[in-house]
Image (tube, coloured by chain):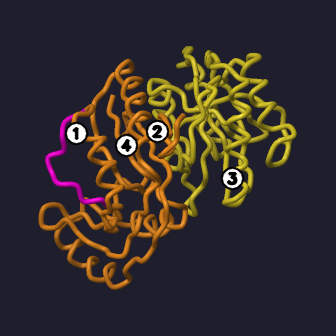
Chain colours: A orange, B yellow
Amino acid sequence: MKYGVVAFPSKKLQDLANGYRKRYDPHYALITPHMTVKGVFEADDKEIEQVAEAIHKIVRNHKPFELKVTKVSTFAPITNTIFFKVTPNEEILSLHKDLNEDFFGDKPEYSFVPHITIAQKLNSGEHDDIIGQIKMFGVDHTEVIDRIHLLYQLEDGSWTVYETFRLGEES
Amino acid sequence: MKYGVVAFPSKKLQDLANGYRKRYDPHYALITPHMTVKGVFEADDKEIEQVAEAIHKIVRNHKPFELKVTKVSTFAPITNTIFFKVTPNEEILSLHKDLNEDFFGDKPEYSFVPHITIAQKLNSGEHDDIIGQIKMFGVDHTEVIDRIHLLYQLEDGSWTVYETFRLGEES
């Protein structure tokens, strides 16, 4: 089964992201807006209990973090993905590191750019048409994230939450 | 903000339900297959912390429960909603009771019929066309549910998980 770990931002930021996703992101219906902290990895039913236990141990050593988005950016020309860029900070980077190095799943191939996707799978024409417009509209929002979620993927591609982990809690 | 409490069944049962939902349920993309244990209620940002705390207290007194589906049923003619009927048992009924009586939100207007919706908002013709077929195919599955989730609804109608509660845990 495929798993991943994400942070869901507040309703306010999710609603804003969905305004774009509804039109420009074919994954719109598969998962609500999120910042991925551990990309897709495979685990079976038994392993996942160990994964959950290991995440519990990790989150104890991490405090709630600031999620600040002040910029619309794009991964083009690598992929035509447009996103709210999350300003990296020590808390986010170290949480990502702990969830990805010496942990379940492969080490990520790319360097970590924390972000909330708002458009993807666009062709170059579409991408170039809308990027200027979305950048001009911009984004400016700061909030505190105090929990992350372990999700698994169904056959139709949609994601279900398996478990929530509060950052910094002893539980 | 609108909140609700659900149990997500296993991937296997969700995949089965989604086979129908994809075609017959306009809520398909808004939430993955689930059994509602507390229907929609309103709470603001401050109240929800109290709600979460209260659910934590409740789940301590409830053990994981058996979710057994052996029958396809319908709420017609009240509403044209087709569902996997969950065989009621003491654990499910008492969990529902504790989450709905003397708790946040209004007391439910209808008696509790535990179920996983697979088709809804059908017109009568559609309903009558497919009910026989789905009933004939049937369902027969039993599993153990060890957690419930508190969700909130976004402006577009989709649901995001706020928190997971493991049944019977002290945390």
* Distance from the alpha carbon under mark 1 to that under mark 3: 35 Å
Q: Which residue is mark 3?
A: B48
Residue mark closest to the camera, 2 vs 1 = 1
A17 magenta-colored:
no
* Distance from the alpha carbon under mark 2 to that under mark 1: 24 Å
First of labels 4, 1 by sequence position: 4
Q: Quadrant of residue B165?
A: top right
| A37 vs B154: above or below | above
Badge 4 and badge 2 in a common chain = yes
Dots 2, 1 in contact, CB < 8 A: no
Q: Secondary structure at mark 1?
A: loop
Dots 1, 3 in contact, CB < 8 A: no
The residue positioned 42% from the left and 63% from the top of the image is A67
Stretch of the chain drawn in magenta: A105-114
The residue positioned 70% from the left and 60% from the top of the image is B44
Residue mark closest to the camera, 4 vs 2 = 4
Q: Which residue is mark 1?
A: A101
Relative image position of residue B26 (x, y in whole percent): 55, 49
Q: Secondary structure at mark 3?
A: helix
Q: Residues within 10 Å of mark 2 (few under 14, many from 20)?
A: many
Q: Is residue B6 left or right of residue A109?
A: right
First of labels 2, 1 by sequence position: 1
Residue mark closest to the camera, 4 vs 1 = 1
Disc 4: host chain: A
* Distance from the alpha carbon under mark 4 to that under mark 3: 23 Å
Foreground of the two, A164 or B14: A164
Q: Secondary structure at mark 4?
A: strand
**Residue B27 has which mark?**
none
Q: Kindly identify the amino acid type of the residue bearing the numbered disc 1.
A: Glu
Q: Which residue is mark 2?
A: A160
